Image (cartoon, rainbow, N blue to C red):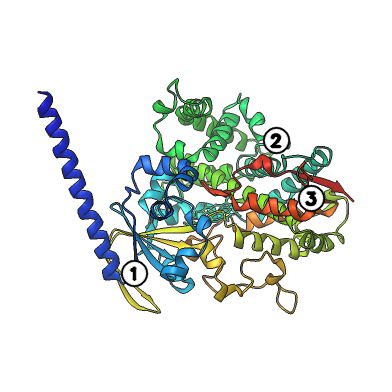
Amino acid sequence: MGSTILSTIVTLLFVYFLYKSISFLRFYIHAHRAGFPAYLSPVLSKSIPWLVLAPAFQPQLEKYLPGWIYERLDLVIHGWEFRRKREFHDRLGSIFAIVTPDECSVIVADPAVGNLILQRRNDFLLAPITARLLGFLGPNVFTVNGDEWKRHRRLFAANLDERISRTVWIKSCQQAQTMLEYMVDHPGGETLDGLRSIAINVIGQSGYSQKRPWSPNLRELTVDAKSGRTAYFMTLSMVTSMFLEAAMLPTKLMRLPLMPPALRSMGKHLERIPQYTQEVLEEERQAATVVSDPRHNFLSLLLQLSDEEKRRGQSGFSLTDEEITGNMFIFSSAGFETTANTMGYAVILLAAHPEWQDWVREELHVLDADVSTWTYEDVYPKCRRTRAVMLETLRHFPPVLHSTRAVLAPQRLVSSDGTHHLAPPMDFFVSHLSIHLDATIWGPDAEDFKPSRWFDDDGQIITPPKGTFLPWSGGPRVCPGMKMSQVEFVAVMATLFRSARCEPIPTLESHRPEDLQRRLQQLMDNSVSKLTLQVRDVKAVQLRWIRD
Ligand code: HEM
């Protein structure tokens, strides 16, 4: 009996090994026939254990494995573009393929080819892995293709308009003012968390009219979840901070007693998401009946459009409750982390480069010292240097390192090397960061932080050639929150830097500004890419804010 089980296991393992070896060979042939240089890695790169464990243990793998082995693994651990910068493109060219037994993935750092891929949304589809990762709370704009995508996308296009810009502006200025009051009296490691609080409150306000005062500690605020709305909001923010675990692990597993408390708590709340969703939708439907209090938040507009369509029996806009939850999650997660991290990097960069801080503050000094008098229409257009700081920050630290697309039917792709014949399945990663650091596009100082590069001789902000600047991606699926994030960034930065400057706090080891600035740079270099690119050790960013 025992030997039969053993021989069955051995046979199954052998068949599996054979199957994976054949796949490895097949993917290599795909890369070769398409004419892309292939870089081989013998890892099951799409298996759940690899996807969950490899990012967690990447620092240990780097520390303990010999360089030549680690290199083969590093390229299939999320975030390698940030860790390696242009190293592999310099060796293998602007387009190359990573081949494993699980995939043939083509990495594109050629702006013209990247642009082509992003334009052809029906040939280069959103990858099934993205749908799986981002769709676990319900189908949404990020997880669908073709006409389905158009239906979801129209909801975002209809909602992220100038009305939301005004709400975002007011809320961001108010929140940043409160944060500054606090930070001036509390030097230390709270600035990045403070910016995260702003970003989540701005999303809460513009997403569900969730009014919350700024607080230095995001986590403390989110623990006490009494109403459906707060619980829903809290669960979404938990999910964004432990995204891979939330997307990959079954809730039953998360709730096991041996799991860490944070995971158990998330599991508990995730199981209640359908109930919270019903409560939030019901609250919003009730609120919409109060004519004296018209609501302009994302959820109310989504419900309005969806309910109207259902009543009229049309299917252009209507969404199921599951789709509404899925899209609310995307609105929150796509809009929160990306903007929060961009503001975080910008503050660190300005603290590490006081000359650029002075440059941007020179622009802000002409604004009224009383932020409550600022209007979006008047002040936003005046803050051009502040916008240039955002663009330069995003060039160095794009929160989303690449746009992923999948080829699921044979396609052709033309590059300067000729025509590539693509055999499915093949994934494409248009590498934002590698393109942003290309010295042939951005000049020999491409690696420097230099916000003034964004101005032309007439003092206007330049529009870089197509495909060369992609923090918000490009083509029809370009980020619909692009303007919203710019408005939030400018409002927050202008409020913070109008009347205060920010600098690193001296440490026991050194008081020399050069050492302190170098340390900030090291903390940024030690970033990690989770759902988005972020500083690994947030509390180590020790800053003080000094009023003029
Ligand atoms: C600095 C801030 C932001 C950055 C850098 C950013 C970046 C991106 C990128 C790169 C994509 C495309 C991904 C791909 O092509 O695979 C994307 C898509 C998207 N973003 Fe953003 N985003 C930001 C802010 C926001 C905000 C504020 C919202 C809304 C509240 C938002 C909502 C979305 C949505 C819904 C999509 C999916 C679009 C589609 O597939 O049609 N983003 N974003």
Residue 268 located left or right of residue 525: left
Q: Position of residue 310 (x, y in %)?
A: 44, 43
The quadrant of the image that shows the N terminus is top left
Write down the residue under mark 2: 212
The kind of residue tagged 3 is Glu
| Location of mark 1 (residue) | 36
Q: Earlier in the sequence, mark 2 or mark 1?
A: 1
> Who's the residue at 50% across and 58% down the image?
84
Q: Pointer 3: what residue? A: 503
User: Eyeballing the image, is 413 above or below 494?
Assistant: below
User: Residue 406 falls in which quadrant of the image?
Assistant: bottom left
Marks 2 and 1: which is nearer the front? 1
- Indicate which disc, 1 or 3, sits on the residue closer to the N terminus: 1
Mark-to-mark CA distance, 1 and 3: 47 Å
Q: Where is residue 19 drawn, in percent x and y?
A: 19, 49
* Disc 1 element: loop
Question: Is residue 10 depicted above or below 420 in this figure?
Answer: above
